[in-house]
Amino acid sequence: MEVVGLLCLAVVVLSWGFLWFGDYSERMESQEQSGLLGAGNRTLLVIAHPDDEAMFFAPTVLGLTRLRRRVSLLCFSAGNYYNQGEIRKKELVQSCDVLGIPPSSVMIIDNRDFPDDPYMQWDTQHVASILLQHIERNGINLVVTFDAGGVSGHSNHVALYAAVRTLHSEGKLPKGCSVLTLQSVNVLRKYISLLDLPLSLLHTRDVLFVLTSKEVAQAKRAMSCHHSQLLWFRRLYVLFSRYMRINSLNFL
C-alpha cells in the first residue's frame, strides 16, 4: 500500500508540473520584458570542460535561445584528462551546434595552466584575467557559469565561480554586465528528474528554465555528440538528472 501511495503521489506531482508548464514560456517572456535578464543580447556561457554545456547547462542555453538571446561559449580546457583532448574539442563544437551555438561562437582554451584535473587548483586571478578580456572584447552583458558548489563539486567548475566572483566583487566587470550562476542541489534532487520541479519552483530565487519534451530531446542529442564520454553511468545521468531538464539560476 505504501508503494502504491508513493506512486500516486509521484503521478500527482508530475501532473501538476506539466499543468504548470503550460504558461511557463509566457511567464519567462514577461521576466525578460521586466529587465530581469538585462537589456543586452550577448550572453557568454563559461564552462570548464567539453560536455559541461550539455550535461549541466542545456536548459539554460535552450531557454535563452527561446528568448532570442545570442549565446557564445568559452571553455577553459580541452578535457584532456584521459588524453582525449582533440576528440573532445570536436565533440564540443558538434554539441554546441545542436544547442544553437554556432562554431564561430565557441572558444576553447587549450592551455597547460588549466588542466582537466579535479585535483589541480586553477589560479583564480589568471582565470579572471582571461575571462575579463573575453567579456570586454565581445561586449558581453550576461555571464552564465557554475555556482560555488560547481554542481558536481569538481574543482575546475568551482574555479570558474571563484574567478567570476572576484571580478564581480572587485567591480571589474563592464557596466551593465550581470552574472548568473547555476544552482547546485543535493544528490537526491539531482537525480529525480522532473519530480524536482516543485522544489525548483520553491527554491529558485531569480531565473528558472524548464525544457519542453522537444527541447529535452534536443538536449539529449547534444549530449550524444560526446561519444567519448558516454559511459554507462553518464547514460543513466542523461535519463535521470534534473540538469537535463531544469536549470535554476541566481544572480551574483
Image: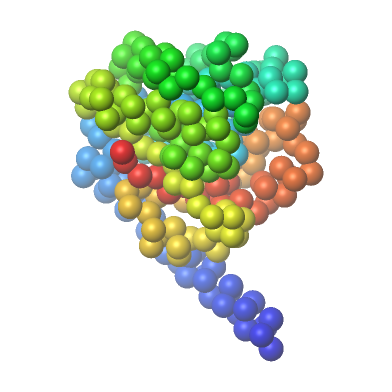
Front position in the image: 37 or 174: 174
Q: Position of residue 31 (x, y in %)?
A: 28, 47
- Residue 103 in view here: no
On the rendered structure, is 60 left or right of 133?
Answer: right
| Residue farthest to the bottom, as pictured | 1
Residue 143 on image: x %, y %: 37, 29
59 to the left or right of 38: right
Res. 3 in view: yes
Name which residue lies at 53% across and 75% down.
12
Rendered image quadrant of residue 148: top left
Residue 87 at what x, y percent from top left? Answer: 72, 18
Residue at 48 percent across and 60 percent down: it is: 197
**In the rendered image, the vertical position of residue 247 relative to residue 125, given as above or below:** below
In this rendering, would 57 be left or right of 202? right
* Front position in the image: 229 or 71: 229
Q: Residue at x 64, y 41 (%)?
A: 220
Q: Position of residue 111 (x, y in %)?
A: 57, 11
Q: For the N terminus, give its image quadrant.
A: bottom right
Using the image, determine if residue 215 lies above or below residue 108.
below
Rendered-image quadrant of the C terminus: top left
Q: Is residue 53 above or below residue 72?
A: below
Number of numbered discs on residues: 0
- The foreground one among 238 and 79 is 79
Which colour assignment does the render follow? rainbow
Residue at 70% of width from left, 14% of height from top?
Answer: 86
